Each structure stands twice: as C-alpha cells, then as structure tokens.
Amino acid sequence: MDNVFQSAFYLFLIIILVKLSQFAYRVIRERRYRKELAQSGMPYIDKMDGRQFEFYLQALFQQLGYKIQVTPSSGDFGADLVMKGKEKIVIQAKRYSSKNRVSLSAVQEVYGAKAYYKANQAWVVTNSYFTKQAKELAAACDVTLVDRADLQKFINEVNPVFKAREIFENITPEPRKCPKCGQDLVVRDGNGTRFFGCSSFPSCRHTEKLIRK
C-alpha cells in the first residue's frame, strides 16, 4: 500500500513539474515575442495608414541599397513600390488590421505589375496575414508573400535607421476630403490619439480614424 501511495505521489510530482515547465516556457516565449515586437516597431506600423506604410518600406529598402520608385496613388498598375538593385522587384504594400487577411486580388495585381514594369520578382508585403487562396495563387505565380511574422523578423535583422515610430509621427497620412462638407481633413491630436478632423471645424465636426481597415 505504501508503494502504491509513493508511486502515486511521484507521479503527481512529475505532473506538477511538467506543468510548471510548460508555464515557464510560455512566459519566456511571450516575453521574447513582446521584445521582438517592440524592437520591430510593429505596434506603430499597425497605426499607420497605407501611405505611411509605403514610406516606411521605402526607407527600409533604401537602407539595403535599393533605388526606390514610388508609383502614383492611382494608375500604379498593381505596384506601390518599384525597387531597383541587382534585380528589379515590384511590391504591393498592404497595411491592414491584423484581423483582416490579404486576399488573392493582391497577388493578381502585383503579378500584373511584374509584367508591366518588366521586373524579376513580385512581392506582397503586409503587417497582417494572407488567405489560403492568396497563398495558393502566389505559389503558382511565383509571387513572394511577406506576412506579419516575416516582416517583423526582417525588420529586426535590418535594424533600420528610420524607426516605425518616426515615420508614423512625421509622415502625413494620405489626404482625404470631408464627406459632409467637402473640405480637407487634417490630422488632429486629442487625449493622446491622432485622428482626422474637418479643416472647417467648428462649423463641421466630422472626424475619422486615421486607419482605414
């Protein structure tokens, strides 16, 4: 009976030690993730709009020696950036909410841009993730997908001079018109939060979030 009790006690002890080890591993992994997240500036990238995200990628790749051509906001033929180095690379930048996944239309568009700009490679870069269909099409079309995890790792490896926070705070978001009165929307600060407010305030009190999901 004592042997049975002793065996049960040791088994219980082993289970407790395993559980503690698993908990400690999760804590260490979470701390490492948060440190890498902060180093990459991803929290600020998540606050950017599309224009700011393009500027950030431009600064990132310029540091690696690429010559960057920023395409027009309209009529870009599916590419936001054209990078010239040893090879020509077209990039479509997708600054999304992390809850929204990039669809296969982004792959279709950048694949067309590859042909138009006579590029060697086509990339879609996002702070989010891709749908299953986007991944399947990219594999078939030889399009490189850079998702949130890839981007974070890449930024930490490059350790860019221009940090995401600097781009977010100093580059003006894409201009917009007030849907109520037609005047320009301007960036305002309120309680530590930046937002678009109508330039005709106080006669028009329309506001919008900086980020379009």
Image: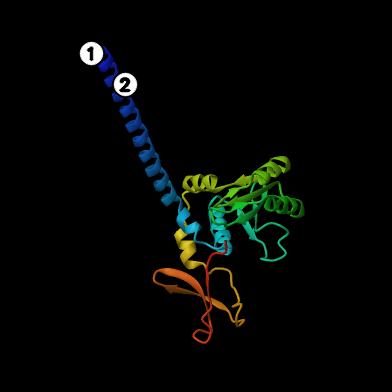
Q: Is residue 15 left or right of residue 167?
A: left
| Residue in the image at 50% along x and 57% along y | 45
Q: Residue at x 54, y 44 (%)?
A: 150
Quadrant where the image shows the C terminus: bottom right
The local crowd at label 2, few if under 14, some if 14 to 19, many if 20 or more residues have their Cα within 10 Å, is few
Could you tell me residue 98's position as x and y percent?
Answer: 53, 53
125, above or below 18, in the image: below
Q: Position of residue 5 (x, y in %)?
A: 26, 17
- The answer for how far apart the CA atoms under marks 2 and 1 are is 14 Å
Identified by mark 1, the residue type is: Asp
The amino acid beneath tag 2 is Leu
- Dot 1: element: helix
Report x, y in % for residue 70: 64, 61
> Is there CB contact under 8 Å for labels 2 and 1?
no
Measured as percent of width and height from the top left, residue 188 is found at 47, 75
Residue at label 2?
A: 11
Q: Which of marks 2 and 1 is nearer the N terminus?
A: 1
Of the pair 119 and 17, the residue shown nearer to us: 17
Query: Which mark, by number, is residue 2?
Result: 1
Relative to residue 30, is residue 52 drawn left or right? right
- Can residue 194 be seen by looking at this rendering? yes
**Crowd around label 1: few <14 · some 14–19 · many ≥20 (10 Å):** few
Q: Which circle, 2 or 1, is nearer the viewer?
A: 1
